[in-house]
Amino acid sequence: MENQVIVGVDVGGTAIKMALLSTEGEILTKLEEPTPVAEGEDKVIEKIARMITDILKNANVSNEQVAGVGLGVPGPVDTTTGVVLQAVNLHWTSTPLKEKLERLTGLLVKVENDANCAALGEMWRGAGLGAKNMIMVTLGTGVGGGVILNGKVISGINGVGGEIGHITLNPQGGPPCNCGKTGCLETYASATAIIREGTRLAESGRSPLLADALSKHGQLRAKDVFDAAHAGDEAAIAVIDEAAFYLGLALANLVNVLDPAKIVIGGGVSAAGDFLFSRIRQSFVRFLTFSFLADTCQIVPATLGNDAGVIGAGKLIHEHIAS
Ligand SMILES: [Zn+2]
């Protein structure tokens, strides 16, 4: 196993992020290029293959030294066959990514959902370090999720395991979600949801601070809503309270079932820090079946940022070597 390296890839709708990793998950070098989505899946896969050639060449690494290539993709994956069942942002349906990339590179390829990869990354090298039972939630444009039990990511039989963002929290309605339902966690706790509510406050005149920010920037960022809440704006605080309430409720229900050691919260919104986390904990504790679960399950911020995806993709290969 000496001198071996792993290639970790995070295939997003905007960019292909790639890292050369040691077999212990340390990043050696990185490469990032735009995803040519409009050119079709074959061009994207060819580009990934070319980027692999480039990153290895620049690091003076031969193909024989590569243990394998792990990829995270934005959608459900059949992890056995490496077929991407659907990736809306890539316009892919039933794409045999593993087969095509193995043919192009001659390397071993493993594929997993990107949110699951982020969870694996945080468990291996980040905030989840040492936890074999862990839930990861990513609060960004949407709400991503990954569940790890006994060190294994839960993909389920359709590759959609861990889709925390689409837990229904308001069965009587609630805001419409991208998935077609209403009242999903994502419609309350994503950056998109916080911006939507903040904009509503600004336009209705209920928050002078947000109205100012809206007229200054033309549109709000989630950070504007957090800033207004920080400054004591009651209406903005109510938006954050609502997001934290639903997140705490969803997480408590998951913990009641799964009993993990850690919940890792990542994504842009998590940068709000203790202002958000203390509110999530308040709601979380309220909905736990056993109060001691509040002591055994830590809620912590993610530490790897945008690198979680490539590191977690690399973990797929690390697991393969270990077995
Ligand atoms: Zn949904």
Image (cartoon, rainbow, N blue to C red):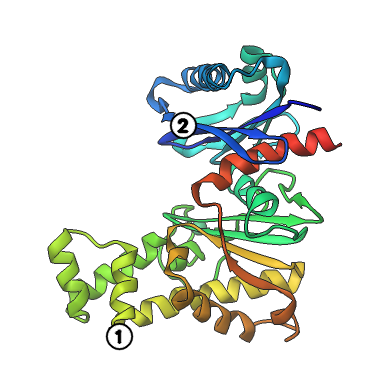
Q: Is residue 200 left or right of residue 127?
A: left
Residue placed most toward the observer, 279 or 95: 279
Residue placed most toward the observer, 29 or 127: 29
Label 2: how many Cα within 10 Å (few below 14, some 14–19, many 20+): few
Relative vertical location of residue 122 with respect to residue 76 in this rendering, above or below = below
Determine which of the numbered discs, if any, sits on residue 232 in the image.
1
Mark 2: C-beta under 8 Å from nearest atom of ligand 1: no
Question: Is the C terminus in the top left, top right, bottom left or bottom right quadrant?
Answer: top right
Relative vertical location of residue 107 with respect to residue 188 in this rendering, above or below = above
Q: Residue furthest right?
A: 323
Identify the amino acid type marked 2: His
Identify the amino acid type marked 1: Gly
Per the image, label 2 sits on a secondary structure element best described as loop
Q: Is residue 109 left or right of residue 164?
A: right
Residue at the spot x=63%, y=45% of the render? 117
Residue 185, visible in the rendered structure: yes
Residue at the spot x=28%, y=76% of the render? 228
Mark with earlier residue (2, 1) = 2
Relative vertical location of residue 42 with respect to residue 177 in this rendering, above or below = above
Could you say which quadrant of the image residue 1 lies in? Answer: top right
Give the residue pinned by disc 2: 91
Residue 171, visible in the rendered structure: no
Q: Is residue 312 left or right of residue 33?
A: right
Mark 1: C-beta under 8 Å from nearest atom of ligand 1: no
Q: Is residue 109 left or right of residue 223?
A: right
Label 1: how many Cα within 10 Å (few below 14, some 14–19, many 20+): few
Q: Which percent across, then down, holds residue 33?
A: 42, 28
